[in-house]
Image (cartoon, grey):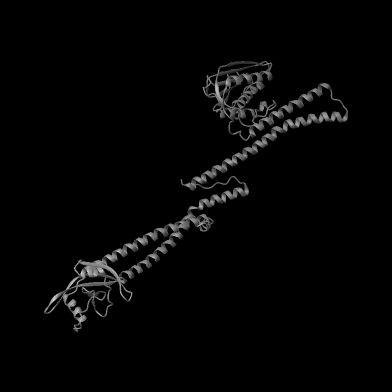
Amino acid sequence: MTGPLRRVRALPLRSRLALLVATAVAVAVAAVAVACWFVTREQLEDRQDEALRNTSVDERYLTSLYGSCLGTGQQLPRTDSGLTVQLIDAQGTVCIDQSYAALPVTKADLAVVDRDQLTALHSATTAGGVKMRVFTKQAEVKQPGRPALELGVSFARPMSEIDKPLSTLAWVLLLVGGIGVIGAGAAGLWVARSGLRPVDELTEAVEHVARTEDLTVRIPAEGEDEIARLSRSFNSMTASLATSRDRQAQLIADAGHELRTPLTSLRTNVELLARSDETGRAIPPDDRRALMSSVKAQMTELAALIGDLQELARPDAAQPGPLQVVALHDITRAALHRARLRGPELTITEDLAPWYVRAEPAALERAIVNVLDNAVKFSPSRGTIDVVLHRGRLTVRDHGPGIPADELPHVFERFWRSPSARQLPGSGLGLSIVARTVQQSGGDIALTPAEGGGTEAVINLPGAPQPPPDAVSA
């Protein structure tokens, strides 16, 4: 069976469907044909048996038949051409027309002659090999001047009266079934071709995408069946892949653009320092210190940009790390300490109420640090930054120039920087990382203009003022 199964599995799908349909129809036709043949045979046999039971001949025929056996020279009248009549006495001797073959006498026939039973119905085969259906019943033969003889009379008909119609019926059923199976196979192949046409289109589209990397291919999806759903899924997949590829290309272009500026400045400064050493012309101490400070600042900016790119490129960037129950007020207080070091001339006020959330501690602290860094960066000298945490709502409010309303929808996009802030250090990735981290923790973030000037960053994180009893890693 393994060999045929392998050969079937090697066939194309439409051929297998056509073969499956043809096989199913063949099994159904065969079952119906066999049932029809057996039912017809049973009905024909019942009719033949009933006809034999209802057969009767004139007493004069039986007398003439018995006399012909005794050699009286009596002429037998004609009977039904398909009917064989035979007389049986108590010794099992038979008396039959010489034009017919004698029927074998069974115990059931002798029991009828002995009056042990009324009738007997059985099948028998003559010496010539003819199958007969035999019905035996009691009979009396009267002769002039003698008492009536108690004999048995058998009526028989050839089984060919049934076998021939059954044979014809079998050939008819075979022919009709064969035509039906061939027609079913052809219909199955047509249905398979029609039904699998969308699959062929999908296959061609997939091969086209694999060959050309063209993700703009779309497959028409009509209806609500499985093929239509598969087509829609393929279209959604190619659209998602196209969007992902466009984002990757944009990310590479933006990263290249952002890296070019500090690298160009760094290269210029390094070339000036190298030329000074090569030519022996010393750079004034103040200018040299300015160049070294610029080199250090550009290296710091490059390190920050590379760190942000690594953060975005992490394999698990789309999935949060292990979540833990952390104290948001403690994390915010630690971030505030770092912010005060970066802006010692600024006044940073804090009002932190206890609040516990489930988050990735390192990522959440980095996000809050990024928000505070933005506030420090855009605050005027000796300005004030207000930080308030109340029932999961963390507000960071600066008194800087603020963000124009038309720029607010873009602040969380990668590498986006306000035109007014392009001269300031930064990669444009900080707020993008903040938004992703907050969303992975189940919260949301928004930047809005503050009353009286400046910008207000609001982070909402679900949690509770008290740590839960099971405050362990999620």
Return the residue found at the far left.
145
214 with respect to 115 (left or right): right
3 shown above or below 238: below
Q: Give the image location of residue 116, x and y in percent.
A: 20, 66
345 with respect to 57 (left or right): right
Q: Give the image location of residue 348, x and y in percent.
A: 63, 16
Q: Give the image location of residue 40, x and y in percent.
A: 31, 64
Task: Specify the quadrant of the image occupied by residue 365.
Answer: top right
Q: How many marks?
A: 0
Q: Give the image location of residue 256, x and y in percent.
A: 70, 35
> Residue at 36% of width from left, 60% of height from top?
32
4 shown above or below 148: above
**In the image shown, does 25 or 201 lie closer to the viewer?**
25
**In the image shown, does 381 or 101 lie closer to the viewer?**
101
Return the residue found at the far bottom.
73
347 shown above or below 278: above
Return the residue found at the far right.
280
215 with respect to 113 (left or right): right
Q: The C terminus lies in which quarter of the figure?
A: top right
Task: Specify the quadrant of the image occupied by residue 93.
Answer: bottom left
**In the image shown, does 303 or 168 lie closer to the viewer?**
168
**In the image shown, does 298 or 355 lie closer to the viewer?**
355
109 with respect to 343 (left or right): left
Task: Specify the quadrant of the image occupied by residue 169.
Answer: bottom left
73 shown above or below 155: below
